[in-house]
Image (tube, rainbow, N blue to C red):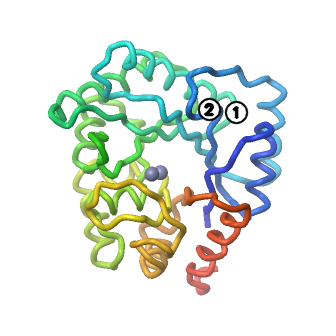
Amino acid sequence: MLIGFHTSIAGGLPLAVKRAVEVGCTTMQIFSHSPRSWKLDDIPREQAEAFIKARAEAGISPLFVHTSYLINLASADDALYMRSIDALRTEMQRADQIGAEYVVTHLGSASSSEPDRARERVADALVRTLDGLNVKTDLLLENTAGERGDVGHRFDDIAWIIERTGISSLGVTVDTCHSFGAGYDFRTRKGIDATIKAIEGSFGFERVKLIHLNDSKHPLGSNRDRHENIGEGLLGLPAFRLILNHHKLRDLPFIIETPKASPEDDARNMAVVRRLVNKTRE
Ligand SMILES: [Zn+2]
Ligand SMILES: [Zn+2]
C-alpha cells in the first residue's frame, strides 16, 4: 500500500528520504523550502541529484510537494495575487527539479461575501501559473474545511474552478479532516459511499490522486481544520479502517499529516494505520 507522511526536510532534502524510510513510508510529501517564507534559495544541483537517487533507492513513489502557506490564489489584493501566481510557478519548477510527480496546493481564501469572484480569481490564477510552464510535475488542488473564507470546501466549487480553467491535467487531493469539517462524513460505509458519489458528481473520481489521511479535532460540518492523530479524533478508528480498506480508495496514495508533538508520533500513527489494513489483502 502507498502510505507515507509529510516529512521534514530539515538538514537537507536527502535526510527527508532517510526519515521517511525509518517510519516505513512507501510514498511521501515534503515542502521544498520553509512554507512560511517567500524567500527561496535555489536547490543546489547536487542536493537535487542526491535526493532523487536516495528516493529511487528507497523505492518511495509518488512524491508530493506541498506548496507554501503564503500562497493565496483567491486574494483580492493584486500584489499578493500576482506574487502567489509567481510563487506557485516556482513551486512547480522546484518540484520538477527534484523529480516530484505532484505539487499539492491550497486554493487560497477570500472574504466570504464574494465567493463567486474568489473562485474566478483562483481559476484565472491556475491558468496563469501553468501557461507555458514546461514541467512533468502535475498540480493537485486540495479541498478545504471552509475555514474563514477558504476556497474549495465543496467538491462542486473545485469542479467549477477546474472546468473554468479548461486544464485537463489538474488533479485533486482529498483531505479526510478537511472533508469532515466541510460536512462530508467518512465515519460509516454509507457516508464514505455518499462522499465518493459527491466526488463522482462533481470533478470526477479519476482526478483524485491523493488522500490526506488525518483525523479531526472538530466535528462534522464544523468548518474547522485541526488535524488529530489517526483514531484519536472525531473521525475515529472505525472510519480509518473503512477508508483504508475501501475498494475505491485503498489503491490511492495516503499521506498522513498528523501532529508531530514528539519524535515517536509518526511511528505510532503508522503502526495504527498498518493495523487497520485488512490482513487478507496483504
Ligand atoms: Zn492536507
Ligand atoms: Zn489541514
**Is the residue marked by circle 2 packed among few (<14), some (14-19), or many (20+) residues within 10 Å?**
many
**Is the residue marked by circle 1 packed among few (<14), some (14-19), or many (20+) residues within 10 Å?**
many
Which residue is drawn at the image coordinates 44% and 77% (left, top)?
236
Ligand 1 near label 2 (Cβ, under 8 Å)? no
Residue 271 in percent (x, y) is at: 66, 75
Residue 112 in percent (x, y) is at: 20, 37
Q: Is mark 1 on a helix, strand or loop?
A: loop
Mark 1: amino acid: Ile
Give the numbered dot on residue 95. 2
Q: Check the image and report above or below for 145 versus 246.
A: above
Question: Is residue 1 or residue 108 the one in the foreground?
Answer: 108
Which residue is drawn at the image coordinates 44% and 22% (left, top)?
84
Q: In which quarter of the image is residue 93?
A: top right
| Residue 121 located left or right of residue 52 | left
Residue 117 in sight: yes
Residue 141 in percent (x, y) is at: 41, 41
Which quarter shows the C terminus? bottom right
Which residue carries the number 1 mark?
A: 98
Q: How far apart are marks 1 and 2 (CA)?
A: 5 Å
